[in-house]
Amino acid sequence: MTEVSSLTGRLLVATPALADPNFDRAVVLLLDHDEEGSLGVVLNRPTPVGVSDILESWASLAGEPGVVFQGGPVSLDSALGVAVVPGESGRSSARTEDGPLGWRRVHGAIGLVDLEAPPELLAAAVGSLRIFAGYAGWGPGQLEDELAEGAWYVVESEPGDVSSPAPERLWRSVLRRQRSELAMVATYPDDPSLN
């Protein structure tokens, strides 16, 4: 078996050629990536459902827009909380138990929130919180195959990506900030047949 270099904490940005409608212009934050597979959440798929409608106790900590995001096509009936804890970014990006109770570091200042914990545990520490229904998942080697096929660009994440107040513009803004030819992909038209 080949060794998998972890992409945990990185962003997968859908290429214009990716045909799967679940991931059209998607920006996925990888929460876990190893030889057993990969798991992430789509950062730019807001739903019309308010956080207060399903997790009222967490609504006051959710950033704008205060809605649930569709994290991916898998387990849409489950919820994941992803939060940025300011001041944690300078610490190790490895998973450690440091940080506030109810929060587990994924990468830098970004971590998973235990939605079963009382929100008061995290209220003072959380800079932004986003709630996701479902997730994106890949079995062993599946993501690597998609990367080899050119379905995704892999870029560094920034803590602000998790809480972007304009998620509909995230695909373009993540590409635009790249210091390579990827910045030009941000100008790719929504429907190239109209050119």
Image (cartoon, helix red, strand yellow):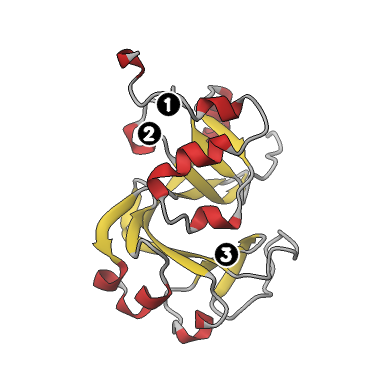
Q: Is residue 119 left or right of residue 87?
A: left
Residue drawn 43% across the image and 39% down it? 26
At 43% from the left and 46% from the top, the residue drawn is 136
Could you say whether the residue bearing mark 1 is in a helix, strand or loop? loop
| Position in image of residue 65 (x %, y %) | 36, 61
> In the rendered image of this protein, does residue 5 appear above or below residue 185?
below
Q: Are marks 1 and 2 in contact (CB under 8 Å)?
A: yes
Residue position marked by numbered label 2 in the rendering:
24
Count residues near mark 2 (Cα–Cα under 10 Å), then give few for <14, some for 14-19, many for 20+. Answer: some
Residue 141 in sight from this viewpoint? no
Q: Is residue 15 above or below residue 99?
A: above
Q: Nearer the viewer, residue 177 or 147?
A: 177
Q: Amino acid at mark 3?
A: Gly
118 or 75: nearer the viewer: 118
Relative placement, left or right, of 46 versus 37 is left
Q: Which residue type carries mark 2?
A: Asp
CA–CA distance in space, label 2 to label 3: 25 Å
Q: Which mark is residue 111?
A: 3
Disc assigned to residue 105: none
Q: How many marks?
A: 3
Residue 186 location in percent, x, y? 50, 30
Could you tell which of marks 2 and 3 lies nearer the N-terminus? 2
Task: Identify the image quadrant of the N terminus.
Answer: top right
Classify residue 81 by image quadrant: bottom left
Badge number at residue 18: 1
Q: Answer few, some or many: residues within 10 Å of disc 1's Cα (few below 14, many 20 plus, some between 14 and 19).
A: some
- Residue 6 percent location from the top left of the image: 67, 45
Of the pair 98 and 175, the residue shown nearer to us: 175
Foreground residue among 76 and 1: 76
Q: Disc 3 on helix, strand or loop?
A: strand
Q: CA distance from mark 1 to mark 2?
A: 7 Å
